[in-house]
Amino acid sequence: MQRSNHGNGDQSMNSSAPLATAANTGQYLPTPTLLPGQTQAPHTTARAWPTLPELVNALKRRLVLAAFLGILVGMAGAAAIWLAMPNGRHRASAMLQVKPLSLIGNSIDQNIEAEFESFKKNQQELIRGRILLGRVLANPNIAKLSDVRTADDPVRWFSESIKVDWRSPELMEASIRGDDPKQLQALLGALVTEFERDSVAEELIKRKVRREHLEKSLAEIEKQIESHEKRLKKAAQLGTGTSAEMNVELLKFENSELSRIRSDKKAKENEIAKLDIEQMQHNKKLEMLEKQEVSYEDLEKFSAKNEEVKFLSAEKMEQEIVLERISKTFLPGTQTELAQKAKIADIERKLKEKLESLRPGLEKEIRLLNRRIVDSQVSLNRQQHEFLKNFLVVIDKDELATMAKIKSLQADGLNTTVDVNSLKPWMEQRALYHAKLLELDAADNSEKRIKIRDDAHVILNQSFNQKVMLSVAAFLAGCLFVMTAVAYLEWRSRRIDSVDQVINDLGLRVIGTIPAFPSKQALKNGDAAQSQNWRFVLNESVNSARTMLLHTAKTQNMQVLMVTSAMQGEGKTSLASQLATSMATAGLRTLILDCDLRNPSMHKLFDAPLTPGCAEVLCQEIDVSDAVQPTTVPNLWLIAAGQCSNRVITALAQGHPLETLFNRLRGQFDFIVVDSCPVLPVADSLLVGQYVDGVVLSILQDISQLPKVMTTAEKLTQLNIPLLGAVVNGIKPDIHAYGYNYVKQLPA
C-alpha cells in the first residue's frame, strides 16, 4: 500500500517554511507541509571561503599528506633561499677604473666607443684568466694560504670564486667571498696589483708600436717634403736663364718629378695590396685559432705555474736523466731500462691526464692571448692602411698638379712658375703626425688606462644569521602554504566533519550519533576493559537513536523504516543492522529486509547464507514466508537480497510487487528495517522509499560530502518520501569528558 498519510513533501520544524525552487522552471513554489518529525530539505548556499575551524578539520583528514608535501616544498624553498644568497660569510672587493682610448686621432681609430666596449670585455675575461691567476698563485705569500693549499685545482677555484661587476661605464669591481677576511684581502689585493701591472705593460708595448708606426710615416712625409723643396730650389736656379732654356729645363725636371711621383704611387698601391692580403691572412688565422686544437707543448707551457704540472714535469725530467745514465751504464733492452721507460711513460700519462683536465680553461686563455696578438697586428695593419690611403690622396693631388704644369709648359713655353701650394698638404701631414707623437709623449706621462681606484678591502658579513632565518622562514612559509592549500582543497570537497554541520548547514534533524569503530590493531593492543567500555558506548548510542525513532513511530504510526545514504561506504548497512538488533532486544518483533539488491551484504553481518530472498519475492518466484529466515538475535528475522537481475529491477520499478511485499510484512512484524542502495548512484532507493513510512540518512563523519548529502535529501523530499533525519557515524567522543563512566555492564 502506497503511503497517503505522509503529506505532500517536506517541512522544517520551524513555524515558517522557506520557498523551494521548482526544478528546471525558474519559478518559486511554496514548500509542502511536513509531517511531525519529518525534516526539511536543506537550503544552503556554498561559501567561497572556509572558516578557520573548517580548515583545521579539513587538514586533520589529510594531515600526513599535507605534512609530507609541506616538508618537501618547504625544504625546496629553504634550499632556494640558501643558494640564492651569497656564499661565504665575508666579502672582499676592489675597484678598478678603466678609461676609454681617447688619445688617438679619428684618422686612425674611427670608433672609440666600439673599441672601449671590446676592451672592457677583454679585461673582464683577463682578470679571471688562468695565466694571470697562475702568476698570482705562484707568489710564495699567496701559495701558503690555507684556501689555496687545500684546493684540488687552485687556479680553477680562484677563477670560479672571482666575480666581476661594472658599477659604472668606467668602474669595474672585482670581488671574492669566503670565511677568512685576511686571506680574501691578500688574494684580491695580489690579483688587482698583478692585473694593473699587466695592463700597464701592455699599454707601453702598444704605445711603442704606435710610436714606431708614426715615426716611419713621418719619415715618408719628410722625404716628400724634401723632394718638393728640391723642385722649388731647382725652379729658383733656372729662373736666371733665358725663357727657352728655362722651359726646356723645367719640362725635363717636371717630367722626372712626374716619373718619381708615379713610382711612389705605384709603390704605395703595392703596399696597400700587400696589407689587404695580410688582412685576409689575419682573418683566416683567427678562424684557424678558434678551430685548431691546442698542442700539448702549449698546454704544458701555459700551465707551468700549476703546482701539479710543475711537479710532474720536474719528475719527468729527473727520470729522463736517470734513463740516460742507465742507457750509458747498461746494455740496451735490460729490465732496468724497460722499468725506467715504463716509469717515465706513467709520468707522461699522468701529466697528459692533468693537462687534459686543464685543457678547457687553458685553451680559452691561449686562444684569448693569440687573439690579442692577432688583433694587435690587425690594428697596426689597419693604421698603416689608413696612412697609405691618406698618402695616396696627397700623391694624387701632387700628380695632377705636376701634369698641369707640364701641359702649361708645353702649351706656351712661357710659364716658369712652380706651384708652392703643392707643398702645403705634406706640411699639414707632417704637423699632424708631429702632434700625434706629442700626444703619445703626453700619454706616457698621463694616468694609466687601468688604475686601482679602491684597494682590496673586506666587508664583514654580519647577515649569516639573517640567511639562516630567511631559509627557516622560507621552509615554514612553504609548509604553511602547502598545508593551507591541501586543507582548502579538502574543504572544497565539503566533507561533513561535525554534527553541528549536519544541523546548521544541511538543516537535518540528527536522530543519533554512532561512535567510530576502533581499528583492529587498537582492539588487539588495547586492554579488555577499554574494549568492553567501547562496546557499551556503541550499544547506548544505538539505543538512543532507537528511542528517538520509536517515539516518532508512535506519533506517526510508522512501521517500515528505510536506511540509506548518499554514496557507498557511508555506514548505512552497519547502521541498519544495529538499529534492527536494538529494536529486537527491546522486545519488538523486528525484520531486517535487504533491499540493496545490487551489492547485498546484510547476510554477511549475520553469518547467514545468501538464500533466495527479496529479489525472488519481487519476481514472484517464492513466497514471502519462504524468504524469511531467523537470526541468532532473539526477535530478529532476516530477508536476504537474493540474486539480482534486470527482471528484478523491472519488478522493483513497477511498484506493485514491492507494495504487496510490505503489506504482508506489516501484519507479521512490529518493525521493519529496510537496508537499501545509496541514493545517488542508482534509483533503487527512490523506488523503495515511496513505499516506506520514513527514511533515515546514514552520514559518515569525514567521509560524507555535504553537496552529495544535500542532493540526496532534495531527491527524497521531491518524491514526498518522509526524511526523518540523519544518524552521524564515525564520531570520536571523549568518553571521560562526556560522562560515559555511567556506561557499565549491568547484572542480568
Image: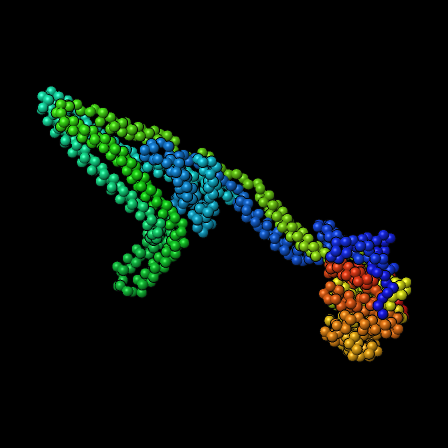
User: Taking 381 as reference, is 712 left or right?
Assistant: right
Q: Position of residue 741 (x, y in %)?
A: 85, 61
Q: Is residue 525 above or below residue 84?
A: below
Task: Give the camera-side residue of 380 and 427.
Answer: 427
Task: Give the camera-side residue of 492 and 210.
Answer: 492
Residue 297 visible in rendering: yes
Say which residue appears at 87% left-offset and 66% top-offset.
558
Task: Give the camera-side residue of 393 and 234.
Answer: 393
Task: Give the camera-side residue of 103 and 621.
Answer: 621
Q: Is residue 461 above or below residue 551?
A: above
The quarter of the picture where residue 649 lies is: bottom right
Q: Position of residue 511 (x, y in %)?
A: 83, 60
Count of marks placed on residues: 0
Q: In the rendered image, which quarter contains the C terminus?
A: bottom right
Residue 527 visible in rendering: no
The quarter of the picture where residue 682 lies is: bottom right
User: Taking 178 as reference, is 508 left or right?
Assistant: right
The color scheme shown is rainbow
Q: In the rendered image, which quarter contains the N terminus?
A: bottom right
Q: Residue furthest top?
A: 240
Q: Is residue 122 above or below residue 252?
A: below
Say which residue appears at 85% left-offset and 52% top-offset.
16
Say which residue appears at 26% left-offset and 36% top-offset.
388
Q: Position of residue 352 (x, y in %)?
A: 37, 56
Q: Position of residue 267 (x, y in %)?
A: 20, 38
